[in-house]
Image (spheres, rainbow, N blue to C red):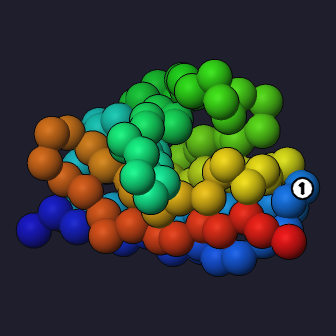
Amino acid sequence: QVRLVESGGGLVQPGGSLRLSCAVSGSNFNFISVRWHRQAPGKQRELVATIITSGSTRYADSVKGRFTISRDNAKKTVYLQMNSLKPEDTAIYYCNYGDIYWGQGTQVTVSS
């Protein structure tokens, strides 16, 4: 059974940092691309970052230079390091791969 579990969200002040984790089980992790998405209240879901099997990465313009996606194949985990956080980064963050496999989400709130 495929399962994705996010963790690491929380409340942080503007300018602060958080690291999100996405633990993946039940899949051939080394051969999947994983994405981080976010959804803020009243807004559409946004693709934030992607890491493919080779380790290449892509980012939304809104997070370029501030967020870094990485993967640890031994731990079957994908990370999202978020620096210089802004109030507009407040959202529920989800990891996903393929069309149907999603985690439950983790809340990130950036506020003073």
Q: Residue beneath label 1, please?
A: 15
Q: Nearer the viewer, residue 24 or 105?
A: 105
Q: Secondary structure at mark 1?
A: loop
Where residue 3 sits: x, y (%)?
23, 67
User: Can you name the residue that lies furthest to the front here?
Assistant: 42
Total labels drawn: 1
Q: Residue at x 43, y 35 (%)?
A: 47
Q: Which residue appears at 27% of the width and 44% of the height? A: 97
Give coordinates of residue 41: x percent, y percent. 44, 58
Residue type at tag 1: Gly
User: Residue 64 location in percent, x, y?
Assistant: 71, 28
Q: Is residue 73 above or below residue 25?
A: above
Check the picture and name the quadrant holding the N terminus: bottom left
Q: Where does residue 15 sit, x and y in percent of width and height?
A: 89, 55
- Residue visible at 78% across and 38% down? 66
Q: Looking at this view, is 10 or 30 the one in front?
A: 10
Q: Is residue 63 above or below residue 83?
A: above
Q: Quadrant of the C terminus?
A: bottom right
Q: Is residue 9 above or below residue 47?
A: below
